[in-house]
Amino acid sequence: MKKLVLALTAMAALTAPALAADMAPRYAKAPVAVAPAVSWTGCWISGGGGYGISRTNRDSRDVLAPNGINVLNATSGSDGWLATAGVGCDYQFSGRWVVGAFVDGTYSDIKGDHAWRVFGPAETFVGENKMDWSWAVGGRIGYLVNPSFLTYFNAGYTQAHTDAYNLQRIVAPFSASGLTVPGQTFDGFFIGSGFEYQLDFLPGLFVKTEGRAAWYDRKDSRLSCTAVVAGTACTAAALGTDPHGNIDSRKMVTYIAKTELVYRFNWGGPVVAKY
């Protein structure tokens, strides 16, 4: 009996390594993948379009002392489409924050009829005022709601230009007056807000939508005679001068909404997200 037990023990010791060799090895589970996110650090270009409205406040006074007020707080408005393009650079920090700087330019057709009360002929005239271009430089700060969606605020300096336009009589005989309102460039500042979102179908392509308000400094202008018109003060001798002695002071406010496609040059693949 003792010999049988020893034989069985020896056999078990010899067969155990062979059985262990035939067993399948155990593998460790792969680590869970971390969600990728595009880096917002880098430079970009953009282009798009939108819609704008403007409001112009006008005062009018005599050019000679005591500079009596002829018109006070006359207000008129304009509206129309716009096309815009811009360039800028951003820097992402602390995970979810983005700060950047940019410059953009806008071609616009924001226009509307503006009435002028001209003292001298004691008539009211009307002409179509148009803001044809503007540009802005500024900075923005934003917060990433998720790795692909940025909300932001921006602010900075801006200039806008209004075209020269001719004035027409608004009572019979509804004819040209010979008077022209000169074109002007206004300086001001703007604030805005918007959001920007990464598109899935093309790496580096984003879309952004923004609203912006701009306030411009008050600026004086004087009418001029650009054509000789019978029965008016715009005679041959008056060409290029102000025949009525009015100084008009204009102050403009604009509001625009625009949507643009943005291409980021720095997009080179995903980085580890920290969300």
Image: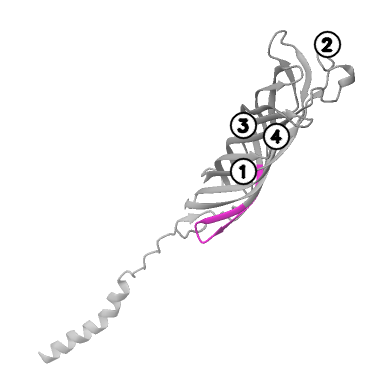
Q: Secondary structure at mark 2?
A: loop
Q: CA distance from mark 2 to mark 3?
A: 35 Å
Q: CA distance from mark 4 to mark 1?
A: 15 Å
Q: CA distance from mark 2 to mark 1?
A: 45 Å
For label 1, the residue is 190
The reply, left or right, for residue 90 in relation to residue 186 is left
Residue appearing at x 54%, y 44% in the figure: 193
Q: Quadrant of residue 86?
A: top right
Q: Earlier in the sequence, mark 2 or mark 3?
A: 3
| Residue nearest the observer in this picture, 38 or 169 | 169
Q: Nearer the viewer, mark 2 or mark 3?
A: 2
On the image, the x and y values in percent for residue 163 come to 74, 29
For label 3, the residue is 54
| Residue nearest the observer in this picture, 197 or 60 | 60
On the image, the x and y values in percent for residue 88 come to 65, 49
Q: Which mark is residue 71?
A: none
Instruction: Name the amino acid type tagged 1.
Output: Phe
Q: Which residues are magenta?
A: 86-100
Judge the density around disc 4: few (<14), some (14-19), many (≥20) Cα neighbours within 10 Å.
many
Q: CA distance from mark 3 to mark 4?
A: 13 Å
Considering the image in quadrants, where does the N terminus appear?
bottom left
For label 4, the residue is 133
